[in-house]
Amino acid sequence: MLILRLVQLQVGVSQYGNDFLQRQGDLRAVRSAEIPAYRGLITDRRGSPLAVSTPVVTLWANPQQLLGSGRENELAELMNLSVADFARRLERYRKKQFMYLARHQTPHTARAVLAADIPGVYGQREYKRFYPAGEVVSQLVGTTDIDGAGATGLELVFEDKLKGRPGKKRFIKALHGESIRDIGVVNEAADGAELQLSLDLRLQHVQHRELLRAMNETGAAAASAVTVDARTGEILAMTNLPSFNPNRRGQLDLATMRNRVVTDVFEPGSTVKPLTLVAALESGEFDIETLINTSPGRIKVGDKVLPDPVNYGEISVSRVIEKSSQVGVTKIAQALGHEPILDVFARFGLGQSTGAEFPGERSGRLPDHDFWSAIDRVTPAFGYGLLVTPMQLAQAYAVFANKGKLVPFTFIAQGEASGGSRHHASRQVISPAVAEQVITVLHRVTGPEGTARKATVSGFGVGGKTGTVHKVGSAGYLDDRYVALFVGVAPVSAPRYVTVVVIDEPSGDAYGGGAAAAPVYSRITQEVLRIKNVAPKSAEPESGELILAGSGEGDTSA
């Protein structure tokens, strides 16, 4: 057999020449390698970059070659590693042909190591994600993992769109596995697609600044805000504090990575009283001027006594909402029964996903008892016994701003090509007339006699509702821990922008929705209307006076 093989080789050389044998040898050592694809850019609605892939070099080594070179200590010093620690690590890998030295190094740093030409040390081109806006938009945009795949937030939601398709190249492999010569590209890498979000980075900065100020002023444990365009369903800004810097992977804390706007649920308290008002108006038994006797300022339901701060006496339904009268809302609930109220809640999207498809979004919960006690029948009307997210509250109030239509929320810029709207996906959940009446009442809430006087915005009419909710502990409601809420709509003449503000556990005397959350809404909305080029009206309307569309406030920006 040996003689036969020698004859074959001799024939090969004489018949095809040395080049033939070279090619045959190359084929036995040809390998394929992946060419990394560029991950798509993420921008805000105006093109400001939110996530960018930058070229980096990952350094790796073949331990068998490196150990045989006698230059291990030199490499450790080049990479600012402990010589002893590196020696121990190298010993663990001594029988392998691959180990990482350092992931995602800048090209400058990698060149300094590779220039030493230490046997068994190699570089591999990759990309690393960089987030120019840092912590301002981190929970929303999300992060990638060490290998560049979407791990959290919108990076994960749109992974298939962003990741692209890696290419493939062929190379000649040497004895120990290192590449010694590229043969050619089999498939070019296809870069990921660009993703333009509905977010406005300017508004993100505004929310971040104002929430930080609120936490400093109130001593709150956390704070959140979301602003949406009710006409298009576009989410314009969404911010949570505490936050995190996605560019500092070693300092990531899971507690700060949570997008509270979609993941945290709480009882909404008085912020759902306008939805109870919808049920009252639809019943035909009430209009906004129907009188309700709230004397003597408290009402007993079962074994519970529900008080108002003072005895408001006989007041209109509108005044019930304006003053957030517990007695008045309870009497409305007793007249209607709980089913019509829960039906409105469901139509407005409470207890359901908003459709924005953000990872970890909670659906909340509507009450569903086997036995409904007297108190169970009325508490949903003023926001207890159910759980909602800030996102759901934004969607509910967007119905009022959008003439009774519920438009699914989106994180993607709708743009001029689609007319800036998603009305094809909307559904009418209440009549335009009812929506207009509720806007009238919400405007009165921010008037001089309402609970949200601090929510007013200079030069504009706004409407909204406060909420102050006891937090729940292991033994029931906590007396000294609250969630302060405000949900508002602006401008009232041509409602379009809805903002929800949540202040978690404010301390001191300013713990209520009117004191802790309403001023934050005011400052955010002032900037929303300025940035969106909404022209201020010439004169401030009296409380409760509804300005008809086109009478002075106008939005000239999508």
Image (cartoon, rainbow, N blue to C red):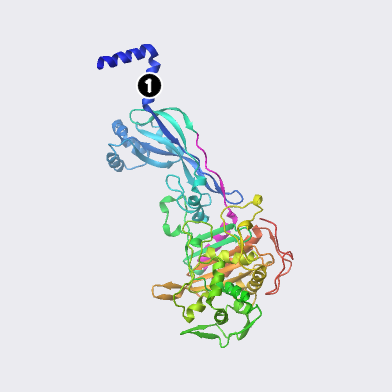
**Relative vertical location of residue 75 with respect to residue 413 in this rendering, above or below:** above
Q: Quadrant of the C terminus?
A: bottom right
Give, as a three-letter code, the residue at label 1.
Answer: Gln
Residue marked by disc 1: 24
Front residue of this view, candidates 237 and 12: 12
In the current view of this chain or complex, which residue is farthest to the top?
14
* Quadrant containing the N terminus in the rendered view: top left
Specify whether residue 515 is in view.
Answer: no
- Residue 48: x and y in percent read 58, 49
Answer whether residue 343 is visible to the viewer in this image: yes
Residue 533, position as x, y percentages in the image:
68, 58
- The foreground one among 119 and 413 is 413
Q: Identify the residue at image location x=45%, y=32%.
A: 169
Instruction: Identify the residue at horizontal 53%, vertical 85% (top origin).
Output: 298
The percent coordinates of residue 53 (x first, y second) are 50, 43
Specify the segment rendered in magenta.
188-217
Is 3 positioned to the left or the right of 335 in the image? Answer: left
The residue lying at 64 percent from left, 56 percent from top is 421
